[in-house]
Image: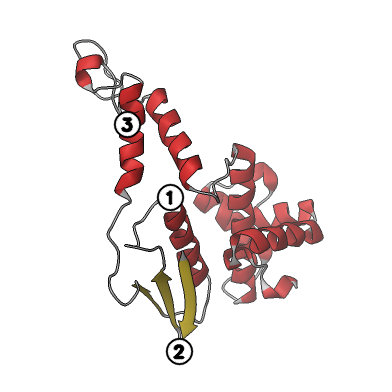
Amino acid sequence: MIEYSKSDGICIVRLNNPPLNAIGFELLEQLCSAFSRANTDKDVRGIIVTGDDDHFSAGADVNIFKRIATSLVEQGCLGQKTGAGVYKYEKGDYTPHRSETAEEVILDVRKEASSAYSEIGREEITRRLVLRMVNEAFYVMEDGIAERESDLDVAMVLGTGFPDFRGGILKYARDLGLDHVMAQLDELAASLGERFLPARRRR
């Protein structure tokens, strides 16, 4: 659905989702991945998003919204008059509240619409975020932005709230074992793209 290329420091992202390049869940995920890839490429100075020769994009895939709306109606979620729609409403109160039913419907439609969809738990989300922080910290050291790893550890604890009992982001990485950290980054880079490529100084 996405064609990615690079020329003279410009990343070109071409939409290829016939017939109208409608943006659904899967195309959106691929767009985010392409942008992340370009963002981590130091040679990229700009991004061009384009479509095929005839048109750019029709916008959001309305068929997805139709499926969500149809499923909600089938479950009796008809809006404020029934106390439930996309949101949940209490009797006599028009304040929208979170609807677990709507969330389940959207999740089901997303799973059907995206072959690449997979549910990610809290531990996996934490792992990916922390490993990105670790990798960026090593890039900071590689580029000479910080002189000592201890300086960066203190900055992360005091400036971002990184848990002080971990000793800092790089202390945490070394406690885990750098070979283990690099192996995990290689694994994530292979499945999720270049944004997880390990810093060169640790190769």
Residue denoted by label 1: 25
Q: Is there a contact, CB below 8 Å, between mark 3 and mark 1?
A: no
Quadrant of res 146 = bottom right
Residue marked by disc 2: 8
Question: Which residue is located at x 64 percent, y 40 percent?
Answer: 123
- Judged left or right of residue 127, residue 113 is left
Q: Amino acid at mark 3?
A: Thr
**Where in the figure is residue 133, as x and y percent of width and height?**
59, 57
Looking at the image, the residue that sits furthest to the top is 91
Horizontal arrangement in the rendering, residue 80 relative to residue 141 (left or right): left
Write down the quadrant of residue 95 in the picture.
top left
Residue type highlighted by circle 1: Phe
Callout in the foreground (1, 2): 1
| Most foreground residue, 151 or 29 | 29
Q: 10 Å neighbourhood of mark 3: few (<14), some, or many (≥20)?
A: some
Q: Position of residue 181 (x, y in %)?
A: 74, 57
Taking 36 as reference, is 53 above or below it?
below
Q: Quadrant of residue 12?
A: bottom left
Q: Residue at x 60, y 59 (%)?
A: 192
Depicted 178 relative to depicted 56: above or below:
above
